[in-house]
Image (cartoon, coloured by chain):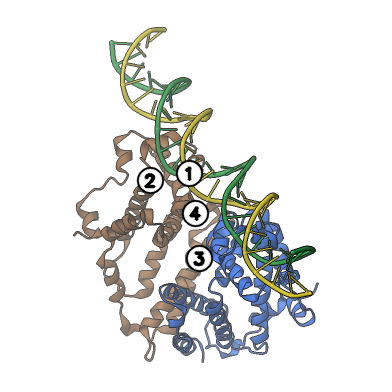
Chain colours: A brown, B blue, C green, D yellow
Amino acid sequence: MTTLVNNLSHKRRDPFILFKTLNIDAEKEDRIINAATKVFAENGYKRASTNAIVKEAGISKGILFHYFKSKKDLYLSLYEHLSEMFAEKIYARLDWEERDIFEIIRQVSVIKFEMFSTYPDLINFLNSVFHEEDVEVKEEVEKIRESLTDSSFTKLFSNIDASKFRKGIDVGKAIQVIYWTFEGFANQQQAKAKSMSVADIYKEDVLAELDSYTELLKKSFYK
Amino acid sequence: MTTLVNNLSHKRRDPFILFKTLNIDAEKEDRIINAATKVFAENGYKRASTNAIVKEAGISKGILFHYFKSKKDLYLSLYEHLSEMFAEKIYARLDWEERDIFEIIRQVSVIKFEMFSTYPDLINFLNSVFHEEDVEVKEEVEKIRESLTDSSFTKLFSNIDASKFRKGIDVGKAIQVIYWTFEGFANQQQAKAKSMSVADIYKEDVLAELDSYTELLKKSFYK
DNA sequence: TCACTATTGACCAATGTGGTCAAATAGGAG
DNA sequence: CTCCTATTTGACCACATTGGTCAATAGTGA
């Protein structure tokens, strides 16, 4: 069983196998991906409507079922494609030697932020797949997830330098607090982003605010 | 414009007006409330099915539409009833003079926890109503919400004793961190609770863990 | 027994579903 | 231009589900 890292370094996968065999321009592929991502993210597998997807993507019903043999096929292919792409980006840009929790979380946050501006529904989709309960896809989702789970990631978080924390601080709990803080911050930003165009979000501003939380937590938890 | 506090102290409202006029035993009323709460919380207004509600409640379709003249009526009555009940409990048990942020959040958490064991879907339902976008109910939800919004609550949080915090700490941001921590903790507990029976959750254990986070944050933020 | 109310669930028209397929279109080669 | 093939369309289908109705039944107290 190879890990994701191995997959990424040794193997060049063509995520949408169905797409590869047919000659489709990238722009249309993107439209379909974004439409499906959005509709699945908002509704879950069962209640997501293929009609809604084709409408959102601006394509005909026929062509969708020409590319994907069924709704299930679309869902699973999309999940495989997006989770691989997501992992790929993360892996390519993380510093795996880093042992400072704030630096790690900052790196992950920056990557997430950048992905959000290109694929606004990606993270929501991946979250919704994670919580998906429908029996028609649950098992196969599990299989795909397994093939992607990687030990490097957990190692990254279990290898954190505890010596930087002040005496008397429960490091495990402190890490939880840090995690919840950045999760909360990300949710807040996403809620904000809903009410404005993507162009109006300035990366520098968001990162500056994020850093102010980092600073606060460092001041409080570190020696 | 009266505030919620005034409503609660001066006025005895019968939340489910429709219920009052007919003689229904409390146990059945609770079954209907819990079923509707659950189904609406999980699906939102539009996609929630009245069939699913009557099945979950173990009642017939006819009787549901005998009590409530429409799905919309059920939804809005339920929202009004539950949000009033929720506010009532909070208001009855909060110490409004308290100025210590941890003490306030702890009080709110305890109340939330207790409500969760009796009405597991209450909080999810109120959250889902808050995010509801369906035009058929949005406006009326807004009206009900307005009639409940109270300034005392915001006053409570804006009146926090900042002098307890260490020098150099951004109190506003620290409060955000505290808020996100307890939100994250609550979500974690709720996820855990899904995989076990309500009886197996020990209040003392949960509160002890919650207090350990309080302790950590106090140690870090307070003088 | 009767009169009355509370409750049922089969039923309905309307809408929406995933998926199909004959036909229209586009594009390149000759 | 004609032909041929590959791409794309959307009307259409059988089926499931929807919110809501109502004649019929069960229950109750006198």
Q: Residue at 41% of width from left, 60% of height from top? A: A133
Residue B123 horizontal/vertical position (percent): 57, 72
Q: Residue A154 versus residue B203: which sits nearer the camera?
A: B203
Residue with the mark numbered 3: A187
Could you tell me residue C29's position as x and y percent?
29, 16
Circles 2 and 1 in contact, beta carbons < 8 Å:
yes
Query: How far, Cα to Cα, is label 3 from label 1?
Result: 25 Å
Pointers 3 and 1 within a single chain: yes
Which amino acid type is shown beneath numbered disc 3? Asn
Q: Of marks 2 and 1, which one's residue comes earlier in the chain? A: 1
Q: Which residue is mark 2?
A: A74
The residue identified by callout 1 is: A53
Subunit that carries the residue with mark 4: A
State the residue position of label 4.
Answer: A43
- Which amino acid, by three-letter code, is at mark 1? Ile
The chain under label 3 reads A
Sequence-wise, the earlier of marks 1 and 4 is 4
* Chain-order first, disc 3 or disc 2: 2
| Of B54 and A180, the residue lying toward us | B54
Disc 2 is attached to a residue of which chain?
A
Residue plotted at (56% across, 57% down): B51
Instruction: Using a 10 Å C-alpha cutoff, classify the residue at mark 3 as few (fewer than 14 neighbours), some (14 to 19) or many (20 or more).
Output: few
Please tell me in which quadrant of the rendered image residue C5 appears. Answer: bottom right
The CA distance from mark 3 to mark 2 is: 28 Å
Disc 3 and disc 2 on one polypeptide chain: yes
